[in-house]
Image: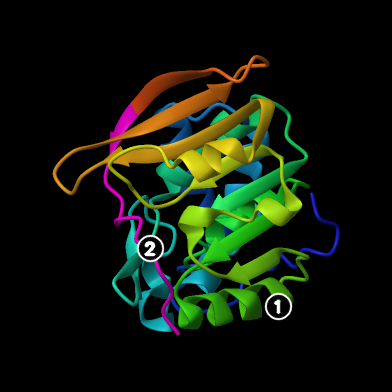
Amino acid sequence: MNPRLRLQPQSVGLGMTSQRVRDRLVERLREAGITDERVLNVVRTLPRHLFVDEALASRAYEDTALPIGQGQTISQPWVVARMTEVLLDVAPAKVLEVGTGSGYQAAVLAALGLEVYTVERIGELLRQARKRFRTLGMNIRSKHDDGRVGWAEHGPYDAVIVTAAAPALVPALVEQLRPGGVLVAPVGGSSSQNLVRLTRREDGSVEETRLAAVAFVPLLSGMVD
């Protein structure tokens, strides 16, 4: 875990960010099938309330997605934990995230000691996420760009995580995955999506596995200031 990570709770009143509230969230995740103690430990200690608007901070440790503005959401903690578990299966060192959003998923990965590169198409969200990374003392590399093209300059990656849904896996992102690496992404339209794990074999072929039904915002092209 990043030794510079500042994990002390910040009060928003009524103990809604207390350790007891966080511990309850971890127990819910454990009951829902999350088994990796490294992931559960980060969920317990990382201050999720810093990644949402102050008006929603009292709900930060509920197992639910929350709005973060610009038509986007911070993912449900179970989804973040499950996607993170999938990546950890290949013991990654370097990870590409497509869709920075609030910055929470990137922060979870960085807190696990991974080298994180994250791309966000909405400039305002990225500016807010960068402030949070600085507050937490996290060295996360970020870029304002169309996430569908990835960040080839720093590839190939041991793992790629996509936090918005496309009708099919994006070839450019698969190509930036090293042989033996794993990509996890929601795939589908607005009415039906599945969390998919893709493993890139040494011969360049891929193996896909459906993990769970999910609901994500769409993966859009282009950039927004």
In the image, is residue 220 part of the stretch drawn in magenta?
A: yes
Q: How many marks?
A: 2
Which quadrant of the rendered structure holds the C terminus? bottom left
Q: What is the quadrant of residue 93 in the picture?
A: top right
Magenta stretch holds residue 215:
yes
Task: Identify the magenta region.
Answer: 212-225
In three-dimensional space, the C-alpha distance between marks 2 and 1, rounded to whole angstroms, equals: 29 Å
Q: Is residue 100 or residue 150 the one in the foreground?
A: 150
Residue at horizontal 78 percent and vertical 47 percent from the top? 113
Residue 110, given in percent of the width and then of the height, sits at: 71, 53
Is disc 2 in contact with disc 1, using a CB cutoff of under 8 Å? no
2 or 1: mark nearer the eye: 2
Q: Is residue 27 visible?
A: no
Q: Amino acid at mark 2?
A: Ser
Q: Quadrant of residue 107?
A: bottom right
- Whichever of callouts 2 and 1 sits on the residue coming sooner in the sequence is 1
Q: Residue at x 54, y 36 (%)?
A: 174
Q: Which mark is residue 135?
A: 1
- Where residue 5 appears, as percent x and y from the top left, is 77, 63
Which element type, helix, strand or loop, lies under badge 1?
A: helix
Q: Is residue 71 left or right of residue 153?
A: left
Pointer 2: what residue?
Answer: 221
Q: Residues within 10 Å of mark 2 (few under 14, many from 20)?
A: few
Q: Please state which of residues 81 and 123 is positioned toward the viewer in this rendering.
A: 123
Report x, y in % for residue 124.
48, 83
Would residue 201 appear left or right of 68 to someone viewing this image? right
Whether residue 224 is visible to the viewer of this picture, yes or no, is: yes
Q: Secondary structure at mark 2?
A: loop
Asked if 110 appears above or below 121 in the picture, the reply is above
